[in-house]
Structures are given as structure tokens and as C-alpha cells.
Amino acid sequence: MSRPSSPSISQVANRSGVSKSTVSRVLNNHQHNFSVKDATRRRVLAAAAELNYRPNPIVRSLSAKRTNLIALLGLTDFGSGIRGGIELAANALMHRLYADGYELCVNVLSPREPAFAPPRWRVDGAIAINNHDAQQIDALDRSGLKYVTVNGPPGPHGASVTVDDDAGTRAAVHHLRTLGHRCIAYAPPEEYNLHDSLHRRRDAYARAMDEVGLAAVPGYDQLGRSAFDTLRSAVRDHGATAVIAYHDQIAIKLLRAAATLNLRVPHDVSVMCFNDLPPCGDLVPSLTAMALPNEQMGEQAAALLLEQTENPSSDPRHVKLPERLVIRESTAPPPNV
């Protein structure tokens, strides 16, 4: 038995009474140098739905100068049941690209390939997520491919979306200072982290403390110590009544360390962190956090890349998004205040 033929773009054009090029632009949601009446758009979409027609991306890429395919670079694995910030950002950019008629392909980092290497197949652009430094994306930057970095530094030819760690750290220190804390420690990650946020948050903490007339608690720049040792030293040796953690994972370990040291949070010591991710809101006590705009980062990255693919001569833009203070149970005035 012969297989029934798939509906063609010509059939959609005939049914809707427009040209094949108009059908293609409507179905692929092209906006650049193209406009169509709403009634015509609805007629094309209705005809495609009635015929169950879907554009073939392979045929489309062979007949056009573009592939409508975007590469997502930087994933280290296929994830888990828990979404982190970068997964939230990737999900948001995926939906934005799909809404604009693009498909997404994923390159998982391989130990045999340079990190963030450009894909070996033709794509219209790339989004690199969570790169540590600009050197990691040097091959991508030299490839001539339009790209955007998310939560990582770009090369000379790339656009970027980052968060404002300076302002976020100042907001964290100001929150604790307003509660009455005068000795505020900072807890770096237990293991060395290559990401540039490691230095941004550490240095921003020292500056923010100086701005409010407080001394940085010793140990804020020491890596390799456990959360338990960091908390014990900050509280027992230096009299800290509050700790700002580099991220939520360290904050969770600080809560456990506090219990081991018979310190009540927040009665004896307040704890807060960067990254408002699960289970920050479900812990006892729930964690005060500086929430990163993960979904917005993904949406902005997609918008910047679409801007570059639609206007190749435009200069790459760099967007810095604000963080948001989420106050919960883990921060309170210090003892005897």
C-alpha cells in the first residue's frame, strides 16, 4: 500500500488564496521587512491547520539562506528532576525561539571537543550558557556565527545577558544592616568554582561592607573550607551574626552546620544566599535569598539573538538584569537587638 502524500505549501497557498512566499513567512512568523493583514494571517493558519501542514525544516534550509535552527551550547548533561537557574533560563529561551519559528538543537559538552565549540552543522546562531570566561568561547567568537552568552562573559563579537551581582550584593548587605547586623560574613563555595560570579560576589561583598562602614569578616576569600568550618570561624572567632552564602547549596549546608553547632537560625545567626531555587522556600527556616531573573535571562538572550539574525549588521548588545530580594524566615535582627 502506497503511503499518502504529505500536504504541500502549494496546497496551503491555493486554499488560502495567497502566494507560497506569504505562506512561508506567516508560518515561520517572519517579522523583518514583512507585514500581512490579520485576516490574511488567520486564513493562512486556518488552511495549514485544515490540511495538517507543517513546514519541513530540512527543505526550508536547502531553499533559503537560513536554517531557522539555533544551537544551544554549554549543557554538561541531560539534567535531573530538579531545575536549576540555567535550566529555567534555557527553557524560557527555548519557548521564545519556538514562538518565532526557530528550532533548537543542543550540544552537550564533550571531553573530546573544545568547550562551547561551534556546531559542525549549519545554524543561524548560537546561545552559550554559563561559560566561565571569554577564552572558553574563543572558537565560537572567531567563527563568525552570531551568538549570545547567558550568565557568562562574551568575546569581542558576542552579545550577552548577565545579572547585576554588584547591586544584588549591596542589597543583601543593606537588608542585614537594616535589621541591625554589624558583623556580616560571606561564605564562598566549598570547592573552587571557575565561574566569574565567584569573584564578582566576593569582591562586591568587600566593597558593600566598606560602603556601609563595616569591616569584611576574615575568611570571605578563602576557598576549600567546608560550610561547617566557615560558619564556626565566622561566629565563634569573629562574632558574626549573619552570613551571606555564595549560592543556595552553601546556604543549605550552613543551616545544617548551624544545627550541629547548636546555633539557632535566625535567632543566633541569620543566613541568606544568592539563587532563590527549590527548596529555599520549603526549608525550616525558609531561606531569604537574592533571586536571579533566570527566565528573563533566557527570554532576553533569545531576543538578542533574534535581533542579530534579523539585522546582521547591528552591534551586539549587553544586558545586565537586576536581582530581587526575597525575604523569608532565615533573617531577623541579631541577638540582643
Image (cartoon, grey):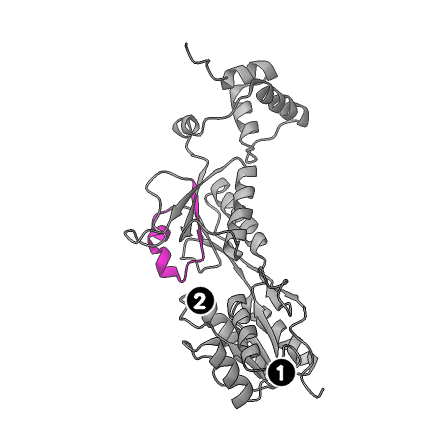
Start and end of the magenta stretch? 124-144
Q: Report the amino acid beneath label 2.
A: Asp
Give the residue at mark 1: 212
Q: In x, y percent, where is residue 298? A: 54, 51
Query: Is 130 included in the stretch rendered in magenta?
Result: yes
Classify the position of the C terminus by image quarter: bottom right
- Whether residue 220 is visible to the viewer of this picture, yes or no, is no
Which residue is located at x 52 percent, y 20 percent? 20
Is disc 1 placed on a helix, strand or loop? loop
Place residue 134 in its image quadrant.
bottom left
Give the residue at mark 2: 196
Q: In x, y percent, where is residue 63? A: 41, 26
Q: Counting residues from the N terminus, which is met first, the one under dot 2 or under dot 1?
A: 2
Which residue is located at x 40 percent, y 62 percent? 133
From the viewer's perspective, is 8 left or right of 39?
A: left
Q: Report the amino acid beneath label 1.
A: Val
Which residue is located at x 41 percent, y 30 percent? 61
Query: Observer-nearest residue: 319 or 182?
Result: 182
